Image: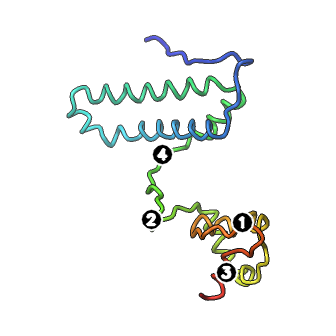
Amino acid sequence: MKKTTFYQLPEEDCERLRRPEMASLRWLISALNSVALAEANLQNRLECIPNGKSRYRLMLGQLRAICNDLIGTTPREQCKQIQNVTNDMELRLVPKYTQNANVVILNVEDMSYIVRHAQKDEELCQTCVKDGNECRSCKMYQLLSAVAPLEDYGSGMMCPYVSDWYGK
């Protein structure tokens, strides 16, 4: 059996991945990991489909090849970094966010920040006097505007969330 070789740009032609490219590559690699794990769960159904297992493995091989080729376009130090980060990644399905959705997805760090803030510093937002850009750089404002957005209030005005603490 012939050993597969992957595409590798000469080191002087390699460019570091930009942030959106890195996110997309991580998504592809996590999809690859998830598709590889799904084969065991779908094995019986794949056997029922004509050429199902071979088509599934062909898809998996193509996805693996494109991921490895994309990694081959990056400098060596970034290749190692990508491989270290993506080994334990998997793809997760979450509900798609829409403007009318009743579900908001928040990461654990942000949620714990809001909870700690509510437990310890409940007076902090009530007495806030930040305005404009100062308000927009406040972590609590950023989290609240992501979870419960209000109309933009323009610069020079108080934080719109202050009035919410006064018990509308």
Above or below: residue 19 compared with residue 161: above
Circle number at residue 139 = 1
Q: Nearer the viewer, mark 4 or mark 2?
A: 2
Q: Amino acid at mark 2?
A: Asn
x and y, in percent, of residue 28 in the image: 51, 36
Q: Amino acid at mark 4?
A: Leu
Lower sequence index among marks 3 and 1: 3
Q: Which residue occupies the extreme top position in the image?
A: 2
Mark 2 touches mark 1? (CB < 8 Å): no
Identify residue for label 4: 91
Q: CA distance from mark 2 to mark 3?
A: 29 Å
Tell me the crowding category of disc 1: few under 14, some 14 to 19, or many 20 or more residues within 10 angstroms, Cα based: few
Identify residue for label 2: 100
Viewport quadrant of the N terminus: top left
Lower sequence index among marks 4 and 1: 4
Identify residue for label 3: 119
| Residue drawn at the location 52% of the way across and 61% of the way down | 105
